Amino acid sequence: MRRPSATRLATPRLRRLAEGRVDGGPANPPRVEDVERCDLCGETIPSEHRHLLDLETRELQCTCRACALLFDRKAAGGGRYLRVPDRRLSLVDLELPDLVWEELRIPVEMAFFFRSSKEQRIMAYYPSPMGPTESLLGLEAWDELERANPILTTMEDDVEALLVNRARGARAHWLVPIEDCYALVGLIRTQWRGFSGGKEVWTEIERFFAELDARSKRSGREIEDQASEAPAGVAERR
């Protein structure tokens, strides 16, 4: 029921980022040839930069600010490339009961879901030591999840995803750029050791989710209600 798809979701640049920390050691200092450059124009770019998604290969392309702006509309680049947005939401009250999770047929406790414009359906992947693996999704369960959580209908096709972490008792959910999912895949693929992964990789996974949470805006019904009830100007300052 599952098929590996490492070549479709892995990218050399993200693998290099993940390999910067191997076995819990310090990040390797960048070499001259490792300096990041825009994949479109060759301009040097900072470590924090925007990406384009190649819809044919599902690989990420690193871009400078100027090139990223050229692809702000879907028609740009003949429709082959999409600019990856930078919206990150911590979905603090996402309704995902254990029964619904089981009906989604995800065999592990971490996964991400995105809507594929090519396949015209929601697709589910989970990270593994062999790379990203597709799980054949129970569509009825996804429809139920979407009805209970309207925020999921706002995901931009191909470039935004629901990221779920239920490992080791966690129950955390985010709406993220697809690049964050790729980064998690690269981390697990390059640092997993043995059957259980090893202490070091779980430390890095915990750090990954902690940093993601720090970068994300909290989103939930109660938070939105409080913002809408606040006096004029207060909600804007939050």
Image: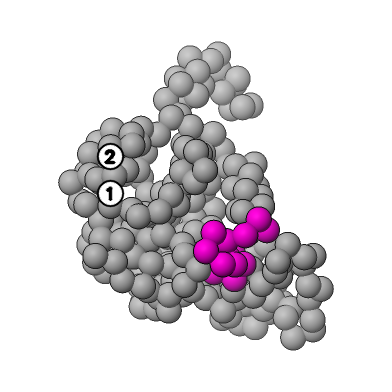
Please determine whether, in this image, residue 10 is positioned above or below residue 203. below
**Quadrant location of the C terminus in the rendered image:** top right
The residue depicted at 22 percent of the width and 52 percent of the height is: 138
- Marks 2 & 1, CB-CB < 8 Å contact: yes
The residue depicted at 31 percent of the width and 71 percent of the height is: 3
Secondary structure under badge 2? helix
* Quarter of image, res 43: bottom right
Which residue lies under the disc numbered 2? 100
Q: Distance between the residues labelled 2 and 1?
A: 6 Å
Task: Say which mark, if any, is on residue 16.
Answer: none
Secondary structure, magenta segment, majority class: helix
* Quarter of image, res 202: bottom right
Please determine whether, in this image, residue 43 is positioned above or below residue 222. below
| 236 sits left or right of 160 in the view | right
Q: Position of residue 69 (x, y in %)?
A: 54, 65
**Quadrant location of the N terminus in the rendered image:** bottom left
Amino acid type of the residue tagged 2 in the rendering = Val
Secondary structure under badge 1? loop
Which residue lies under the disc numbered 1? 104
Please determine whether, in this image, residue 18 is positioned above or below residue 34. above
Q: Where is residue 119 in the image (x, y as percent from the top left)?
A: 24, 66
- Crowd around label 2: few <14 · some 14–19 · many ≥20 (10 Å): some
Amino acid type of the residue tagged 1 in the rendering = Leu
Q: Does the magenta stretch include residue 50?
A: no
Magenta-drawn segment: 182-200
Please determine whether, in this image, residue 34 is positioned above or below residue 146. below
Identify the residue at the far bottom of this view. 33
